[in-house]
Image (spheres, rainbow, N blue to C red):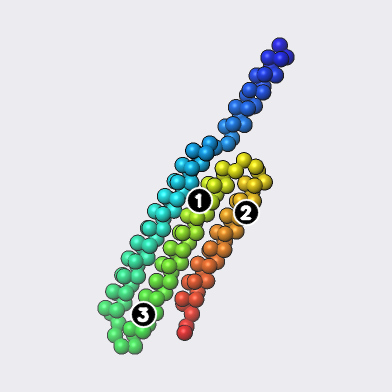
Amino acid sequence: MNHLRLILITGLSLIALSACQESPNETAEDVSEARQDAQEDVSKARSEEAEEVGKKARSEEAEEVGDAREAAQSDVNEEAAKARRDVMLAEAKGRHQVAMEKCDALTDDAEEDACEALANAQLESDKASAEATFKSANEPN
């Protein structure tokens, strides 16, 4: 009776442990989905960037003449810089999502934690880079 109970407990433990780990196919699907989502987000951000810059350029230039045109161009440049920052952030978030899916595939908890820490650090670096790009584009010459 104890032998049967031990076998049953061992079997249930193995089933429970195997349920915690994604198969390589599941991981590949998750990574593929994350890449696709990221690409869609980046495409959307780029489309919005082009639309906003175009709208701003058309409306500002149509209304302004002479010295005011310089101010209008400054506004257009600022909008372009904001849109570029948004694209950079969307790309960074997409890369982060893909990296986190890859980290989920790791079986060792320490490796997974290190992988996630690296992915998070890269995301923060990318965010800082996007903000620096935005600020440098808006600095006076």
Mark 2 Cα within 10 Å, few/some/many (few <14, many 20+)? some
| Contact? badges 1 and 2 (CB < 8 Å) | no
In the depicted structure, whether residue 48 falls above or below residue 139: above
Question: Residue 1 appears at what percent x and percent y?
Answer: 71, 11
**Which mark is drawn over residue 73?**
3
At horizontal 54% and vertical 37% (from top left) the residue drawn is 22
Q: Quadrant of residue 86?
A: bottom left
Q: Amino acid at mark 1?
A: Val
Q: Which residue is mark 2?
A: 117
Q: Alpha-carbon distance for marks 1 and 2? A: 14 Å
At horizontal 46% and vertical 42% (from top left) the residue drawn is 29
Local secondary structure at mark 3: helix
Q: Earlier in the sequence, mark 2 or mark 3?
A: 3
* Residue sitting nearer the eye, 85 or 22: 22
| Contact? badges 2 and 3 (CB < 8 Å) | no
Local secondary structure at mark 2: helix
Q: Is residue 114 left or right of residue 101?
A: right
Q: Earlier in the sequence, mark 1 or mark 2?
A: 1
Q: Alpha-carbon distance for marks 1 and 3? A: 37 Å
Question: Residue 91 appears at what percent x and percent y?
Answer: 46, 59
